[in-house]
Image: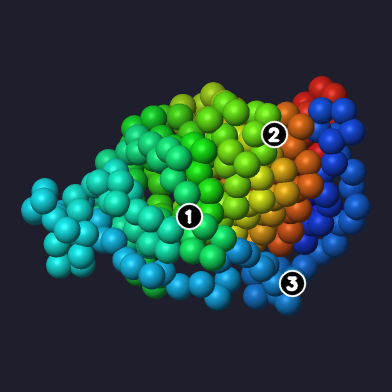
Amino acid sequence: MENKKNKSSVFYLTYPLKSLHKASLVLAALLFCSSTFSAPCDSVPTFADGKQPLREIFVSPAAGDPAGDGTRAHPYPTIAHALQKARPGDAVRLLPGTYSPNNSVNNLAGAADAPIWIGGEPGQPRPLINGGSGALHFSRVRYLVIENIEVSAASGNGVNCDDGGDYAETNATHHLIFRNLAIHDIGTGGNNDGLKLSGLNNYAVLNCQFDRVSAGGSGIDQVGCHHGLIARCAFTDMGNSIQCKGGSEDIEIRANHLREDFSSFLASDIQTNQTI
């Protein structure tokens, strides 16, 4: 098989990452899917399947009324304002436009039967969060669907999600879906990642695109994460596409599109942070 820079292939990778020491790898299987995402790969069930929002809250950076009520006609002007009103079953809809960066989301929780959706409307142009040190930082959150957002020109990580430093609490941050995100032109050349995940449990990264991420960083960097799935994502021009470290385990990676050197696809700190 050829192994050339800019060679484009779709990998169907299924291997649980089991923690033998810190974050050792057990390679269970390596299969190939066809050369497009339309290949008949396994479906990806999620906790949000079959569920619909009970209420929609609208946000627009062009909102002229700072006292908007969150309706489509009178949207809230900021993401923070809308999230203060969000409750289980809500969808926070970001209307098209360019939004301010450095948005922090703490202790926001949906429910198993009523998640919270955050992002652009399905079928509409993605809203753009541009610049700053990062677009969104989620901490100690549960049952969220983050979808349909474009992130660009962050000097740090594009999107962060973590457990708030509560490493011993496995329920600190769990049941997250990151779906249809376009994250590009991230970092300053150092250890900056497109999507930085720390201490997550039960999550999926689906149908996302990562382009031009810092040469010292990763498209997706996972630290101490468990029970995750990365599927049908595309990666171009970054230090490595996917990193698993810090005790991460039970991570399934399949049907991802690599537009770069295969050797930089997956990095893991088996003992010396070698690249697989």
Looking at the image, residue 202 sits to the left or right of residue 26; the answer is: left
Q: Where does the image place residue 29, in percent across and percent down from the top left?
A: 89, 56
Looking at the image, residue 57 sits to the left or right of residue 147; the answer is: left
Q: Which residue is mark 3?
A: 41
Which of pointers 3 and 1 lies earlier in the amino acid sequence?
Answer: 3
Q: Where does the image place residue 169, in percent across and percent down from the top left?
A: 65, 34
Distance of label 3 from label 1 (alpha carbons): 30 Å
Task: Give the residue drawn at x 79%, y 56%.
Answer: 13
Quarter of the image that includes the N terminus: bottom right
Q: Are marks 2 and 3 in contact (CB under 8 Å)?
A: no
**Eyeballing the image, is 263 above or below 15?**
above
Binning the other alpha carbons within 10 Å of mark 2 as few (below 14), some (14 to 19) or many (20 upward) gives many
Task: Give the residue drawn at x 83%, y 52%.
Answer: 15
- Of tags 3 and 1, which is closer to the observer? 1
Distance of label 2 from label 3 (alpha carbons): 28 Å
Q: Which residue is mark 2?
A: 224
Quarter of the image that includes the C terminus: top right
Distance of label 1 from label 2 (alpha carbons): 23 Å
**Which quarter of the picture shows residue 47?**
bottom right
Looking at the image, residue 107 sits to the left or right of residue 261; the answer is: left
Kind of element beneath mark 2:
loop
Q: Where does the image place residue 128, in percent across and percent down from the top left?
A: 33, 51
Question: In this rendering, does residue 242 appear at all?
Answer: no
Binning the other alpha carbons within 10 Å of mark 1 as few (below 14), some (14 to 19) or many (20 upward) gives many
Task: Give the residue drawn at x 66%, y 68%.
Answer: 45
The circle drawn on residue 110 is: 1
Kind of element beneath mark 1:
loop
Task: Give the residue drawn at x 17%, y 58%.
Answer: 69
Which of pointers 1 and 2 lies earlier in the amino acid sequence?
Answer: 1
Amino acid beneath label 3: Cys
